[in-house]
Image (cartoon, coloured by chain):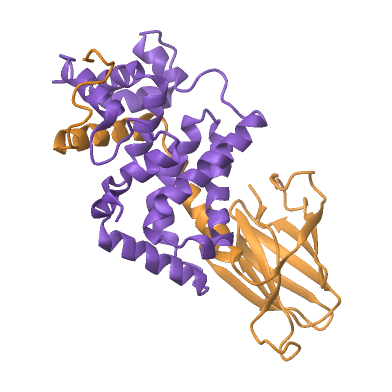
Amino acid sequence: MNPLDEYLDPPEAKRYADALRGAREGDPHALDELVDELSPMLWRVARRQGLDRSAAEDVVQSTWLTLMHKLSEIDKPAALPSWLATTARREAWRVSRRGHQEQPADHQEWDAFVADQVDLGEDVIERMGLAPRYKTLWNVVKQLPPKCRGLIQVIAYTDRPDYSKVAEALKMPRGSIGPNRGRCLAKLRELLHSNPEWN
Amino acid sequence: MTNADGQVMGADAPIDDCDVRNLSAVRELYDQIDPIPDGLTERVRFAMALEHMDAEVARLVENSALASVRSTLQTAEQARTIIFESSALTVMVSVSQVNDDVVRVDGWLSPEGEYRVELRTPDAQHRTVADPMGRFVVHELPRGIFRMVIRAPEGKTGKGETPVVITPSVVLD
């Protein structure tokens, strides 16, 4: 028995199984709930790969459409989140080769804010309304090695029972987030703990 | 902190509530700085609802306003003609603007026949039946995105409800 199985949440697995069966039987809305739940995670998978927002949107959509075409291939419903993450990662990689990377780097406005260089749009300033804590956190997240930052932002949108499988799907098996914290989550914790503005 | 082997301390410890809180703060951060686009999940569900149908997807062959399907309708006079083709059927629709929120859709189907026509938007389905010449009209359709599902005339198919043709989404924005 896979030692990770004990971390799978049986009610969740059953919910995935029911939704997939409904979709196979032709219920057009069987997957609606899961689309709402899991798309934010897929969005992060695409964005961490550096795609611009419009390309990332296409990746999320084509990931779900791929699932519709491959419903019969999903033999382990509990693996649905990691199957979707793998599919989105491949699709994002394919799209990024056609040149939809965001230029310049991601989060430019936020970086400018954090560096106290102003000239932010109204909408950004509005978002800053709840900023101080997030500014500290963003500074910490930026200190993470890029691979860790990518992993953490996806795991943050993943349900706990699925952490390790999704981490594997992102091709981060070494030191990944299984039942144990792993390198990236430990690093985040350490950085936050040692930051006086956070505590 | 790292030890002599370059391992981050505590990496082997089990995930605890503090880790879960940290991750949830990271999620809140990204919700602020890079949220998933409004309406994306609705658009995904809309695309999926037709995807599994056992039907032929018609090809867009002409869109008179612009090369792209994404386009703008500006005046009532500015009707737009869109043509879809499938092996069984050609669908031509003319879309004209009624007001800022509503369009009118006139359609012609070839070969002619009393096809059952559905125009689907993310929020609703508008059903009508073409006349014997294959013409149909939907007087009021919310502006935005729609797809069509066209079923064979009543009694002309052995399989009853099998859709014959669906079209790709047309965006009027």
| In this picture, residue B108 sits left or right of residue A190 | right
Q: How many marks?
A: 0
Q: From where the camera sits, is residue A197 visible?
A: yes
When asked about the image quadrant of residue B66, the answer is top right
Q: Image point 41% across, 25% down: which residue?
A: A147
Q: Is residue B39 visible?
A: no
The chain in orange: B
| Location of residue B95 in the rendering, given as x and y in whole percent from the top left corner | 73, 58
Q: Is residue B48 left or right of residue A41?
A: right
Residue in the picture at 41% in, 29% down: A150
Query: Residue B33: percent from the left, percent from the top?
Result: 39, 28
Q: Which residue is rendered at x = 35% and y = 13% of the image?
A: A114
Tell me: B16 left or right of B34.
left
- Residue B170 appears at what percent x and percent y? 68, 55
- Residue B161 lies, with reference to residue B81, above or below; the image says below
Q: Is residue B129 above or below residue A12?
A: below
Q: Colour of chain A?
A: purple
Residue at position x 31%, y 16% from top? A139
Residue B132 located left or right of residue B6? right
